[in-house]
Image: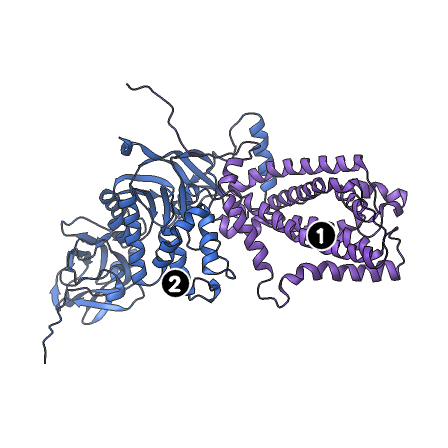
Chain colours: A purple, B blue
Amino acid sequence: MNTKKEEQWDLIIKPRAPFFSLNLQELWQYRDLLLLMVKRDVTTVYKQTVLGPLWFFLQPVLTTIIFTIVFSEIAKLPTGKPPAVLFYLSGLIVWNFFSETLLNTSKTFTENAAVFGKVYFPRLIIPLAKTISGFLKFFIQLGLFLLVLSFFHLFRGLPYTFNAALFFLPVLFVFMSLLGLGAGIILSSLTTKYRDLVFLIAFGVQLLMYATPVIIPLADVPDQYLWIMKLNPMTSIIETFRYAFIDAGSFDLLGLSYSAGFALFLLFLGMVIFNRVEKTFIDTV
Amino acid sequence: MSSSQPVIKVEQLSKLYKLGQVSTGTISHDVNRWWAGIRGKEDPYLKIGETNARESQSDSPYVWALKDINFEVQQGEIVGIVGRNGAGKSTLLKLLSRTTAPTQGSIKVKGRIASLLEVGTGFHPDLTGRENVFLNGAILGMTRSEIKKKFDEIVSFSGVERYIDTPVKRYSSGMYVRLAFAVAAHLESEILVIDEILAVGDIEFQKKCMGKMGDVANKEGKTILFVSHNMQAVQKMCTSGLLLKQGLQKTRGSMEKTIQEYLSDASSARSYVEVQNQSDQQDLPGQVLSVQIIDEQGQRIPEISVGKIWSIKVQYQINKALDSFIFAIGLSTELEVPIRTVFTEATKVAPGQYEAVLSYTDIVLSSGRYSIAVGLSNYEKSFAYHADIIQVLISDISELDDERIVKTRASGLILNPLNIYVSKI
């Protein structure tokens, strides 16, 4: 009996990727690679350094000290009700997570060209691993923040101001990760052709920090500049984070929905562009 | 039978490359493409591409690195992909390993495919050997449990047991490569795409690598695509071949046939050179007309297997009677190290055309490229001399079965069998 049936192929390599494709099954097959990449990122960063993992703490601590001295003590910028140290530290760890995720994922293609040129695996593994390892670092720094916070509660008589916004934290974490990842993979795709972006990203992210309430509370921003702050999707995330822990910031559901929508849009756009670029970037890089 | 079913099917596979700076004009071309695309027309830049003929001059900035490649591979086959530089081997590798996408056509694959274009891809110098085995294995598509299962085998194959918990940056380059290859050799994929540079390290380890490759195919029934310049390795290992030339598919068939085609189609070597003599050279006593390399049967051949008899045939013209004419042929290496110069006895010659043949029956040259010089003189005064007039390629594909002959240049230029007599004193 020779019934003519379609031949079964496990893999078909064709010129063009579909407009949008997210092969979750393939990503799942490579889950071990994802884990190993995360492990590599975390363990190799501070290898052969004297202080080792202490660096995870030193960076936000030192920046917080400098910010407290320069912006709060010298420039007398307001920080609202909570102590300046808590205000800056809380803003910084959230912002640092976003900016580092963006910077690290934006280097996906340029930094891994050698590996990508030799072996195929789902390219999305690399930015995902960067985001996850960045998140682990954020989690450690969050622990630091909670330590400092409880110090103020126990020894400085800071009143307990926890509230229901804490339940929003997991959602905040998801959307700030997606924002960094989405923006990062868009930029990584563009840098394969336009190298100028590499320079732009590095200091662009630094400047972008001034369009968030990391240094100035949203409540103290003059009205004519407020819209710039509100346009930045990280603003409501930082505000909510502070609102939940230290009785500062604000809880604005509209702002949060904007951030969420923005994150999903960036992610979708990022996937579309990433998909197109990953197939042939090795010819242009 | 399942063995008669192809596991790889390549159809109309083509890859277009743009030459020159990538950035110049890319945006406008991108826009044109997009415009053609939404009107449902063909990519305007696909038509102007040309075959990848390096010698030919052309204004087109687009080149087909591969054009209309069609072939099938059955399960368990070891296919040798051969061709000169620029034939498209590397491009085909890239497409098969999915590091870049084809411009047209498709590749269909059954089973898992793993590509080994390099050993130790993704090795991190700060991680230990153990950590790198897992990382590298995962990059190549193995799962954690698969690597765990094979871990001991990998380590013992590499022979670096003692150093497995040391960061690989402390390894010697040999140890590094051995460990990296060991991971590659234990892949679970049904199809392997392998670049020849994979066989690295010292000669002993190279042999081990090659042996392992053969085992993998024979015992485990894996399908292997092997890209190589090294005809000797290809001949030994592969069961069938694919010959590419300037991006086009020339031959797909038995390895023997592929190698024959490869040799007879030596684009870089010429078997016949006609000397362009200027008209004012008519005043000279004589001139060389042509030189050719021929095999035993008198056929012109640009490339000769080690140990095969070959000859140089020179035609020259004598314009006036000479009293003490000497004809000479010199053979030197590519780097102009003279190997042998042969002279005729000084004789009287009458005007006319002559043909001289020198056979290399007694000297067995090792593989490589050799340069031929031809000279005519009278009373030891040269009147026509052509250095490097033609080149002969000795190929390492050998039909000699003499065990004493190591076919590479490692054992010297001359490979004539010589015996060493050993006696106890």
Name the spot of residue B348 as percent of width and height, x first: 11, 66
Name the spot of residue B104 as percent of width and height, x first: 45, 34
Q: Is residue B14 above or below residue B266?
A: above
- Residue at x 45%, y 42% (from the top left corner): B98
**Residue hosting label 1:** A142
Name the spot of residue B254 as percent of width and height, x first: 24, 41
Q: CA distance from mark 2 to mark 1?
A: 42 Å
Q: Secondary structure at mark 1?
A: helix
The reply, left or right, for residue A172 in relation to residue B390 is right
Subunit bearing disc 1:
A
Subunit bearing disc 2:
B
Q: Is residue B191 above or below residue B281?
A: above
Front position in the image: B308 or A174:
A174
Q: Are marks 2 and 1 on the same chain?
A: no
Specify whether residue B269 is in view: no
Specify whether residue A169 is in view: yes
**Residue hosting label 2:** B160
- Indicate the amino acid at tag 1: Leu
Residue sitting farthest toward the bottom: B425
- Indicate the amino acid at tag 2: Val
The reply, left or right, for residue B185 in relation to residue B271 is right
Picture quadrant where residue B337 is located: bottom left
